[in-house]
Amino acid sequence: MEAIVNQLPIGLSIGAVLLLIALGLTFTFGQMGVINMAHGEFIMAGAYTAYLLQGWAGGQAVLVALPVAFAVAGLMGLILERTAIRHFYGRPLDTLLLTWGVSLVLQQLARDLFGAPNVQVQAPGWLQGGIGIMPYNRMFILALAIGSVVAIWAYMNRSGQGRRMQAVMQNRRLAATSGIDTGRVDMRTFFIGSGLAGVAGVALTLIGPVGPALGTYYIVDAFLVVVAGGLGQLRGAVIAAAALGLLNSYAEFWSDASLAKVIVFGVIVAFLQFRPQGLFVVRSRALT
Amino acid sequence: MLSVEGLEAGYGGARVLFGVSLEVAAGQLVCVMGRNGVGKTTLLDTVMGVLPATGGSVTFDGRDVTRLKPHERVRLGMAYVPQGHDTFPQLSVLGNLQVTLEASPHRDPAALEAALDAFPKLKPLLKRRAGFLSGGQQQQLAIARALVTRPRLLILDEPTEGIQPSIILEIEEAIERLHASGLAVLLVEQYLDLALRLADRFLILDAGRVVRSGEAAELNAPEVHRLLAV
């Protein structure tokens, strides 16, 4: 019983990190249909951003890094979309190979710049300690994920930019003939989606070391969250991320890391047999 | 106002349009007719820039727009209602109109009001998701959305296709009113009687070429009936 309770904050915070990563993927994969394997390296870029800012901002590096990492990862995504991905829309396999290649290049680049060994980012003093079983750093990650969900929901549903984004996702051709500059909306979508990966990377520095392969540990799970939650669905991603995070940490606790992966994949494969479309589906008359 | 010269277009290797030319004068309603598969929708898609022209030119208000993107043509005053009463299904009716208004150059909320006045039946439905409307309501929304941009040329692709008869009449009346108020319209229509009532001029496409054009009155000629017969 005690073990179950103790494992809860770990599961929830892993779920929160997965959610932050999956939120970004919801934009680029769920809504634009681009399988961006380099998304994991945007996480890594965000984490290294926090590491670099340490020299300047010291113990508060994590706070300063949140907006900076969003911009850094977002710009990387924007450049990738403009220079490469945009020429491969509607060709998912080519995009997959292309972004995988970019992912490998970025990992090697990080190795060259920062060295192969992991580095550590100092958590701010006020994140040391905790209440009961819940450490402050994991609470912070949870709050960050919740805040991001609320912000994205508001952006998508309450702002003109978000409305245009939805319009392009729902009917690209119609959006173009309605006067919407779809190329600009694509750029914005990629910037935000990739920027969220950077934020996730900063969050990860609070619970572990930073290395060139950081993103690869999370990217597959994050894709699973998006698929299990239903493509492009915010609430599906929230539920799936929490479920996957908890399942992961409990399975790991009762068995070991590799067996836990087998269990998690098994559960998701079984789940998708029953609901291949994921938790939530878009319902409407005009589904094409 | 709209001048199309020797337009050519197609899909991949398959050519669909072979040098189509047409004119729409200011305030005029021109009806494009023809059997299925002769290139009517391809023509409109190319005029709007959804499909690239492989030859010929499209001129709007004396400006060559052949290479412009669709949204740039919207900004110049062209509006397009594609076939199949498309909407943004997950947005509300109001959201559908707003998103177009926000993307238009003038952003005048009065344009939204005016568009709703053209289709008053949409007013009680503003908060509904567009995807849950009936086909006829979606078509009305589609035209209203185009009007929000304050176009000077409205391009309609079979606005009455697959719509219940009672609403066909409403849509026809709305088009008539818009035309009467001075809006130029380029209309693709299959129903001969509807074209007869609405059009100033007509042209008939066959296999990607204009085979006949003239004043609406000439539409009743037996030769025209033969060209349109399935």
Image (cartoon, coloured by chain):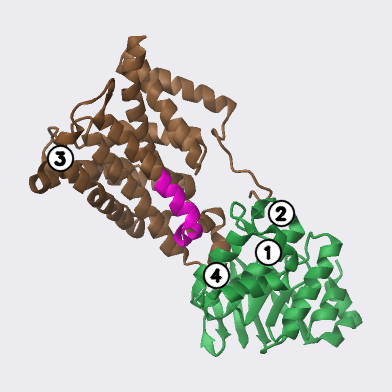
Q: CA gap, disc 1 to disc 4?
A: 13 Å
Q: Is residue A241 magenta?
A: no
Secondary structure found at label 4 = helix
Residue at (78% x, 70% y) in the render: B171
- Please, what is the three-letter code of the amino acid marked with disc 3? Arg
Indicate the quadrant containing the N terminus of chain B: top left, top right, bottom left or bottom right. Answer: bottom right
Q: Residue B133: which numbered mark, if any?
A: 2
Instruction: Please determine whether, in this image, residue B148 is positioned above or below residue B85.
Output: below
Residue at the image point whose x is 41% and y is 36% from the top: A223
Q: Which hue belongs to chain B? A: green
Numbered circle sitting on residue B101: 4
Same subunit, labels 1 and 3: the answer reads no
Does A36 sit left or right of A70 as displayed?
A: right
Front residue of A127/A264: it is: A127
| Chain in brown colour | A
> Which quarter of the rendered picture does the C terminus of chain B lie within?
bottom right
Identify the secondary structure beneath mark 1: helix
Residue placed most toward the observer, B195 or A180: A180
